[in-house]
Image (spheres, rainbow, N blue to C red):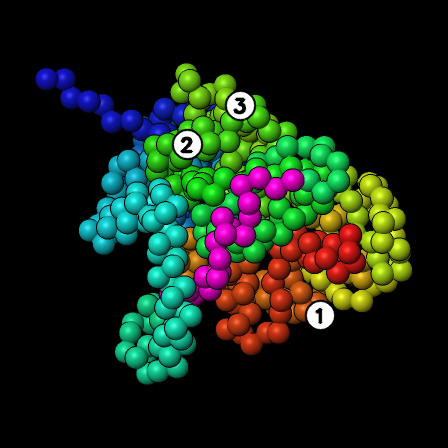
Amino acid sequence: MTPVTQRSHLKDLDYSVVQQCMHCGLCLPTCPTYDATKLERHSPRGRIALMRAIADGELEATKTFGDEMYFCLGCLACQTACPAGVNYAELFEHARAEVEQSGALNSPRRNLIRAFTLNWLFMDLARLQLAGKFLRLWQQLGLQALLRHSDILKLLPRRLRELESQTPDIQPHFSADLIAPVTSAVGEKKFRVAMLTGCAQDLIYSDINRDTVEVLVRNGCEVITPPEQSCCGSLHAHNGEWMLAQQLARRNIDQFPPELFDAIITNAGGCGSHLKHYAKLLADDPFYHKRAELWDRKVKDIHEWLVEIKIQVPSSKSQPAGQESQVPLGTWNLKLETFPVTYHESCHLCHGQKISSQPRQLLRAIPNLKLVELPEANWCCGSAGIYNLTQPEMAGQLLQRKLDHIHSTGALTVATGNPGCLLQLVNGARERGMNLRIAHPITLLAEAYRENGA
């Protein structure tokens, strides 16, 4: 019997992608792990050299290779800096898939955790919501607070105490309880859009999903929000589970046929970066590839979409209600500036999707808001998907660096467009005792509409 040849993600990848790196080193100053260690293997250039060695058959996917690929944040800052246009995102995902395919990092504990989370929990929203309901009950009954104020936690290993402290607060209601399947546009209907509510976003930040729909309908959009949705697959693709990511991509395309919508809206920077690359993910699928190409064109980040359609600017208190106008953002002069806000850029929003100016434009359109630029605004906060769980030391260093910069601005509100960043900054500010509000730009915009009756 002829043995089945196991697929190699890096050897089977288009070689032009692997060899594109010129080794110029312009990426080095932008890489958080290289900046921290000054070790070549912790740089994009060093990692690509390892990937190319595997593609050339000179190296096998060993545990050392696997550890290095998972030490990378995947923040894609190197991709922004690269003059040759190296597609590091594609290399990064295939490198991690190579690690998982080879089994180089296999262990009973790791395999069990991945099987439970990636293969089971995040493959079905009902399972994830059930887990969320148990955690919500635990929190609402005061058991979490009781545990945290007791001496029991002191008996646990340090790492378990750290993980417990990062447990997110579960929302009282999930997205389906807050958002109707069809929400009509306020006034004239100009667009028909679909709303992606996400998985972790649905549990932790369903209020942001509600705010997003509210802002969309105020801007002439009829919004379709099915109550039962699926994970976008970014968690799976970024952690080497290529086939599961493909399965979820097909499921989403079937649920949200791209030909039926003017846009498919996402409000999570990390999810959006992945959602816009379904065509690459399904390149070998004869049935879904063409639909995936249309899908990629229809997926829009909420900031990107609102600027594209020229949002209805909230009226200021000095402007009579009903006199709002659709104007290109950036040309509207604020009458009052009463509260300072700084903006942290989600890595996959600015580096992955190249969306950087649009969130700032929306923030500047909010009456009485003064945008204070954040030093190193596009430097990773350390969240990076589940990086803060798997690489807590490096994630912690990056978080403290980010909080130092936030403190320097004097702002008491930080806006950011990704749930992972939101949670990372919330936990960091709480631990450090900083009086900060962490909010999505769309939440601030929705509040401006409500406050001014627009």
Pick whichever, 47 or 204, lies toward us: 204
The answer to which of 151 and 191 lies nearer the viewer is 191
Please state the extent of the stretch shown in magenta in the rendering.
Answer: 162-184
Relative to 417, is 80 above or below? above
Amino acid under label 3?
Glu
In the rendered image, the residue lying farthest to the left is: 1
Q: Secondary structure at mark 3?
A: helix
Which residue is rendered at x = 61% and y = 39% of the image?
223
Magenta segment: does it hold 167? yes
Mark on residue 251?
A: 2
Q: CA distance from mark 1 to mark 2?
A: 45 Å
Q: Is there any visible trace of residue 78 in the rendered image?
A: no
Residue that carries the numbered disc 3 in the rendered image: 293
Percent coordinates x, y for residue 111 in the rendering = 24, 48
Which residue is located at x 45 percent, y 61 percent? 170
Q: Secondary structure at mark 1?
A: loop
**Circle nearer the viewer, 3 or 2:** 2
- Quarter-of-image position of residue 447: bottom right
Question: Percent position (x, y) of residue 286?
Answer: 41, 16
Q: Which residue is mark 1?
A: 410
